[in-house]
Image (tube, grey):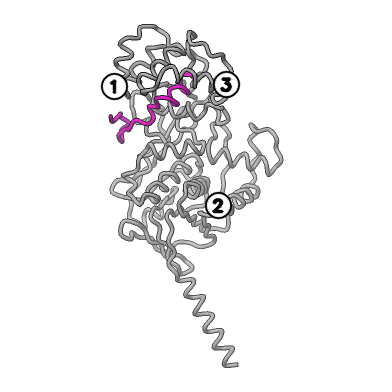
């Protein structure tokens, strides 16, 4: 009997130590809504150890409008359609909380970098050097490098952090901040990477909207950058984060007429966020108009802003319209490419790599789709650095 009692005491002490352990993670997301789960998914997908502290048994997902879905939100909707055996890829499935949780559980369980802590709450939150420390209700301590807080004002109060609402901004080309966009939203809106940051608060991603997967994904990639490179969030490089998000199919510029499934979507997003080709905006949407012909006037100044050599080329080019031939000549001159070999290369790529439906005719006026693809492939303005206001730094 004494031996059994001793064994029980040892086990209790052992499990007590387990409960009181200190856990380290690169990124911590606190919340169980749309924003939180998308942030956690993207941070893990971006290659850093990520923890979502649900503080509940499951996710509390809100219904999603298919509208301008992209990235993780679009993938979630497709996974939901698959679960409900809906074959129409454009149909928004009727929302069901149980199905949403089943889909998300299967998805989160498949990611090796992602851990989910359920039915545990934080009881104390504080700074720990440049990072964070959270005492949890199970007795353990969680120490992340970067914290993502999707709309938890109680947590802000505990950390003595003052925040304001950070929502979508209408796309406006008179302000170059659009070049720092990390998410394109509904009604011709976008979200700058710098809106995530709170003054004097490093390694904190604040998102006031708890129900937005688009913002969650963008916040997850931004947090992952700081954790992966072991740097401050204020030193984040927007180009690197934008490139990561485009690689995972998130719209940065909200082109309503260019879907994720478009074979040239990626090039159009890369060129679109630079403003070399601008959207035509009305009250409810921003359109790219891929088949519209490119005038010299619309691209002359934007390209000159990015490349010194372009100023010389445009001084000699007097045609009112850009042609396929002149565009190839320009990208070779500015991008230091051999003209003859580049023409041969483009000829091979035209209907294979680029999947253009048009014929390659050097004398024909070039449309916006073709122009975006050629510019991105041979002299990408996206590779030119910008500052925090979106102004070109050469």
Q: Which residue is mark 2?
A: 111
Q: Position of residue 261 (x, y in %)?
A: 58, 30
Q: Which residue occupies the foreground of this view, 44 or 56?
A: 44
Q: Residues within 10 Å of mark 2 (few under 14, many from 20)?
A: some
**Mark whose residue sits in front, 1 or 2:** 1
Which residue is under mark 1?
Answer: 308
Is there CB contact under 8 Å for labels 3 and 1? no
Q: CA distance from mark 3 to mark 1?
A: 32 Å
**Point 44% across, 44% down: residue:** 221
- The Cα–Cα distance between marks 3 and 2, rounded to whole angstroms, is 36 Å
Give the class, few, some or many, for how many residues have Cα within 10 Å of label 3's Cα (few <14, many ≥20).
Answer: some
Above or below — where is 61 with respect to 253? below
How many discs mark residues in the rendered view?
3
Dot 1 or dot 2: first in sequence order is 2
Q: Name which residue lies at 47% across and 75% down.
A: 17
* Mark 2 residue element: loop
Cα distance, mark 1 to mark 2?
Answer: 45 Å
Closer to the eye: label 3 or 2: 3
**Does the image show residue 280?**
no
Instruction: State which quadrant residue 92 falls in.
Output: top right
- Tag 3 residue: 351
Q: Which residues are magenta?
A: 369-394
Residue 291 lies, with reference to residue 383, above or below; the image says above
- From the viewer's perspective, tell me whether residue 310 is left or right of residue 23: left
Residue 219 image offset from top left, x and y in percent: 43, 44
Q: In the rendered image, is residue 184 in sight? A: yes
Q: Residue, x 54% and y 21% (percent of image)? A: 348
> 37 left or right of 98?
left
Outermost residue on the top side: it is 319
Residue 138's place in the image compared with 215, above or below, is below
């Amino acid at each position: 009997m004494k031996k059994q009692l001793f064994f029980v005491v040892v086990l209790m002490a052992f499990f007590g130590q387990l409960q009181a352990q200190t856990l380290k993670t690169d990124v911590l997301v606190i919340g169980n809504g749309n924003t939180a789960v998308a942030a956690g998914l993207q941070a893990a997908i971006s290659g850093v150890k990520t923890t979502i502290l649900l503080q509940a048994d499951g996710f509390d997902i809100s219904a999603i409008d298919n509208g301008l879905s992209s990235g993780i939100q679009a993938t979630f909707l497709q996974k939901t359609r698959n679960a409900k055996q809906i074959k129409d890829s454009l149909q928004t499935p009727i929302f069901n909380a149980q199905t949403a949780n089943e889909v998300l559980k299967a998805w989160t369980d498949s990611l090796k970098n992602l851990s989910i802590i359920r039915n545990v709450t934080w009881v104390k939150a504080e700074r720990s050097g440049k990072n964070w420390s959270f005492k949890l209700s199970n007795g353990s301590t969680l120490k992340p490098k970067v914290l993502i807080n999707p709309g938890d004002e109680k947590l802000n109060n505990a950390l003595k952090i003052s925040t304001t609402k950070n929502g979508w901004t209408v796309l406006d080309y008179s302000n170059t901040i659009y070049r720092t966009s990390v998410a394109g939203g509904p009604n011709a809106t976008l979200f700058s990477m710098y809106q995530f940051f709170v003054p004097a608060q490093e390694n904190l991603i604040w998102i006031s909207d708890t129900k937005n997967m688009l913002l969650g994904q963008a916040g997850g990639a931004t947090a992952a950058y700081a954790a992966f490179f072991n740097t401050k969030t204020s030193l984040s490089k927007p180009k690197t984060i934008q490139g990561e998000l485009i690689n995972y199919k998130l719209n940065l510029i909200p082109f309503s007429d260019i879907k994720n499934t478009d074979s040239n979507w990626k090039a159009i997003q890369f060129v679109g966020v630079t403003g070399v080709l601008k959207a035509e905006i009305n009250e409810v949407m921003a359109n790219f108009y891929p088949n519209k012909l490119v005038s010299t006037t619309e691209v002359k100044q934007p390209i000159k802003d990015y490349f010194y050599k372009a100023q010389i080329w445009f001084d000699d080019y007097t045609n009112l319209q850009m042609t396929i031939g002149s565009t190839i000549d320009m990208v070779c001159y500015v991008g230091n490419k051999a003209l003859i070999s580049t023409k041969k290369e483009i000829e091979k790529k035209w209907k294979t790599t680029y999947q253009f439906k048009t014929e390659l005719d050097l004398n024909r006026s070039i449309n916006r789709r073709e122009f975006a693809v050629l510019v991105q492939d041979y002299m990408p303005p996206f590779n030119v650095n910008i500052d925090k206001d979106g102004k070109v730094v050469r």
